[in-house]
Image (spheres, rainbow, N blue to C red):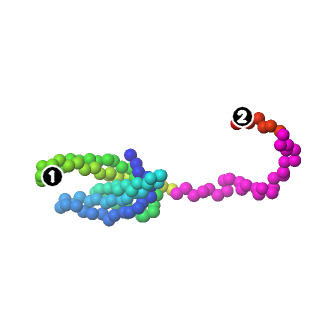
């Protein structure tokens, strides 16, 4: 799966627990009618991938959905979901290509129709 959009935020790498587990979050805002702010977590050695990205970059992030079950101290079972990134790439912003479409000549360059009659019926079916 993938998420594409513009980088809204890149957090610093955090070390969690005594085992040296590292994680780093990035928020990507999608470009659609109702934009979504998707938080994607990178872990361990993948945290370093985010060093090359800054707020405003257009990116494509390859993700996996992760879920886990946890039993809290009261004995209740709780479920967690994580969107985990494993690859990220900058998208090229599409700049309008200059010179690919010839410019439209000004309206005065067209000669007026001299053989037009209001009585002529066109053959259009609508």
Question: How far across and down, in percent of the image, does residue 46 sit?
Answer: 33, 56
Query: Start and end of the magenta stretch?
Result: 93-119
Answer with mark 1 or mark 2, whichever residue precedes in sequence.
1
Residue projecting furthest to the left: 74
Q: How many marks?
A: 2
Q: Looking at the rendering, in which quadrant would you find the C terminus?
A: top right
Residue 104 in view: yes
Viewer-proximal residue, 95 or 77? 77
Query: Is residue 5 one of those drawn in magenta?
Result: no
* Mark number, residue 30: none
Residue projecting furthest to the front: 119
Q: Residue at coordinates 80% horizontally, 37% vertically from top-left?
A: 121
Question: How far across and down, in percent of the image, does residue 63 sit?
Answer: 36, 49
Residue 59 in view: no
Q: Quadrant of residue 38?
A: bottom left
Specify the principal SS of the magenta part.
loop
Crowd band around label 2 with a 10 angstrom C-alpha radius: few (<14), some (14–19), many (20+): few
Q: Secondary structure at mark 2?
A: loop
Residue projecting furthest to the right: 114
Question: How far across and down, in percent of the image, does residue 60 sit?
Answer: 43, 53
Q: Residue at coordinates 77% horizontally, 57% vertically from top-left?
A: 106
Q: Secondary structure at mark 1?
A: loop
Find disc 1 in the rendering and name its residue: 72
Find disc 2 in the rendering and name its residue: 125
- Answer above or below: position of 114 versus 21: above
- Image position of 102 (left or right of 20): right
Q: Quadrant of residue 107?
A: bottom right
Q: Residue at coordinates 57% horizontally, 58% vertically from top-left?
A: 95
Alpha carbon separation for disc pair 1 and 2? 72 Å
Judged by depth in the image, the label closer to the viewer, 1 or 2, is 2
């Amino acid at each position: 799966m993938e998420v594409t959009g513009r980088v809204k935020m890149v957090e610093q790498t955090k070390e969690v627990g005594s085992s040296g587990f590292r994680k780093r979050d990035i928020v990507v805002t999608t470009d659609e009618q109702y934009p979504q702010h998707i938080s994607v977590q990178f872990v361990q050695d993948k945290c370093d991938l985010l060093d090359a990205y800054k707020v405003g970059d257009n990116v494509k992030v390859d993700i996996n959905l992760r879920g886990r079950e946890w039993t809290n101290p009261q004995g209740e079972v709780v479920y967690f979901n994580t969107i985990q990134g494993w690859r990220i790439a900058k998208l090229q912003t599409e700049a309008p290509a200059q010179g690919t479409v010839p410019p439209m000549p000004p309206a005065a360059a067209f000669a007026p129709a001299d053989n037009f009659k209001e009585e002529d019926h066109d053959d259009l079916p609508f």
